[in-house]
Amino acid sequence: MTIGTSSWFVKLDPALFARIGISRGVPRGQSGYRRYTKLNPGPWFNSVTNDRYLELYNAEILAPLDPATVVRELHDMSDGKIPVLLCWEPSTPGEKWCHRGIVAAWLKDNLDMDVYEVGQEKDGAGWSHPKLHPSFRRLGCAE
């Protein structure tokens, strides 16, 4: 794994993983993390439909970025550890989805990079990432 995703509330081994927040805010009581605000959702994050969210996140957040530069910057922030992108949604599979799945799909499309939810690697990467909205997921697709 070269980059992973997870929730702010999952305990990650600090010897292996560098916690990097990509959410608009950080839960109280968090420590030992860095922020990468370029991947934060826009101000519309909780006020649009799922399809509009995907459209806006791709157009406003991801389109202006170079994925190879993003990966390099994340690794530069990680002091030799695996960068793990964090946001608020629970790590467990289910109805709760979030933008970290969209980032995983974007990195798959652009760099052929598999980005997994830490501890849920069996559930897929890219467009099969477990934190993508179910209507966005391409289950069983060749990756």
Image (cartoon, rainbow, N blue to C red):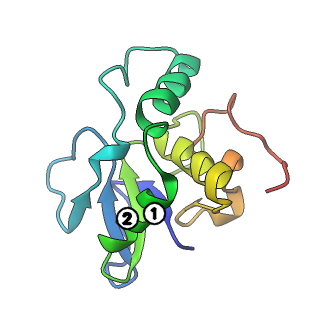
- Quarter in which the N terminus is drawn: bottom right
Residue 111, disc: none
Residue 19, compared with residue 124, is above or below; it is below
In the image, farthest residue toward the top:
48
Residue type for callout 2: Leu
Q: Which mark is residue 71?
A: 1
Position of 66 with respect to 22 (left or right) is: right
Q: Determine the secondary structure under disc 1.
A: helix
Q: Amino acid at mark 1?
A: Val
Disc 2 target residue: 74
The residue positioned 58% from the left and 53% from the top of the image is 107
Q: Position of residue 85 (x, y in %)?
A: 40, 57
Total residue callouts: 2
Determine if residue 7 is in view: yes
Residue at point 21%, 46% (across, down): 27
Q: Name the image quarter holding residue 121.
A: bottom right
Measured from the top left, where is residue 18 in percent x and y?
33, 71
Q: Is residue 113 left or right of residue 142?
A: left
Picture quadrant of residue 94 = top right
Q: Judge by depth and name the residue closer to the eye, 71 or 119.
A: 71
Q: CA distance from mark 1 to mark 2?
A: 5 Å
Q: Are marks 1 and 2 in contact (CB under 8 Å)?
A: yes
Residue 67, percent from left and from top:
50, 54
Placement of the C terminus among the 4 image quadrants: bottom right
Local packing at callout 2 (Cα closer than 10 Å; few below 14, some 14-19, many 20+) is many
Measured as percent of width and height from the top left, residue 72 is found at: 42, 67
